Image: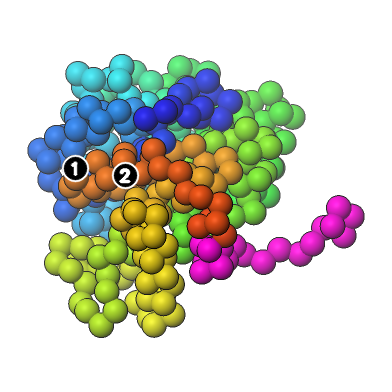
Amino acid sequence: MEKQELGASGLLVSPICLGTMTFGRPVAEADAIQMVHGAIDLGINFIDTANVYEGYDRVLGSAGGVAEEILGKAIRDRRDEVIVATKVCAPVGPGPGDRGLSAAHILEQVDHSLRRLQVDVIDLYIMHWPDKLTPLEESLAAMDQALQQGKVRFLGSSNHDAAQLCEMLWIAERNSLAPIVASQIPFSLLRRGFHHDLKFCAEKNICVTPYQPLQGGLLTGKYRRGEQPPGESRGSDKPQWLWELDEELFDRLEALEQCAGDAGLSMAEFSLAWALSQPAIGSLVVGATRLEQVQQAVAAAGVTISEDVLARVDEICPPPWTQPDPIRG
């Protein structure tokens, strides 16, 4: 796989990033470690986790840390082969200080993540969610402090739109703080709400690393009209995490599957290749329960989709409407 630049960091990352949200359950520790090693052997050098990830047993406010601990064990003897990203913000306890992007919480949680990951430095430290209760100036100053202390190398954001990214860049420049180099957003053929943000990220050299590029498994072809979700799928294990499977959705899925078939690709390969063709996107965060799924994702990284097929996709799953520029047209 050809590596991509992670924004202005100078780091080169694989176009597929291994997600770890499934680590704990349904992917047990031994299997997860084997998956990490297999992913590295396939050429993946970018792995994403978060301080709250603990598999499907996660409940809001639980302590988390499971995925980080498993990943730490997996990379203990292969640290030089991977770029590790983790996150801070989501609740890790019942108290008001156990969540968010306050300086105290960020600086506490970065130490916990370092310990669980068994690393000296986190390559990419990500603000997981916007925090309306904490000024961005405080959050970015704390993130920069962690960087200046040598605990993290670069900074990223997750679930922030272009307007919020613009404000972050402005605050960082005004206060001589480290800038954001990567943005992790939900993005897929079925979820294009951030479509118009990609141009901004490309202009500002912010690498976009979407999560859920297969929309929780909907874009794998495993869900069929009139059939129950297959066993051991997210639809059967965590149906509340899956979109409602209505007729309109199946119309789009079947049309996309026809496009994939015409291109000689599986639905999953087609969906991932499409996402990688979009502006500013450098790496896709792909979660998996089996190494075979990781292998399929790696295969998709080498696929090019023709312009006419891309146009067909826009007809099936159009990008969000935008008003014409009154000056530029």
Give the farthest residue toward the left.
Answer: 30
* Residue displayed at 72% across by 36% down: 170
Residue 276 is inside the magenta segment? no
Compared to 47, does 211 lie above or below? Answer: below
**Image location of residue 308, percent across then percent down:** 55, 56
Residue 327 is inside the magenta segment? yes
Q: Label 1: which residue?
A: 291
* Residue displayed at 34% across by 18% down: 120
What residue type is disc 1 on? Leu
**Image location of residue 39, percent across then percent down:** 24, 33
Secondary structure predominantly adopted by residues drawn in magenta: loop
Label at residue 227: none
What residue type is disc 2 on? Ala
Compared to 81, does 54 lie above or below? Answer: below
CA gap, disc 1 and disc 2? 10 Å
Numbered range of the magenta stretch? 312-329
| Image quadrant occupied by the N terminus | top left
- Under tag 2, what secondary structure? helix
Q: Is residue 51 visible?
A: no
Q: In the visual, does 295 lie left or right of 170?
A: left
Q: Label 2: which residue?
A: 297
The mark lying in front, picked from 1 and 2, is 2
**Image location of residue 240, percent across then percent down:** 31, 70
* Between 311 and 324, the one nearer to me in the picture: 311
* Residue displayed at 62% across by 32% down: 205
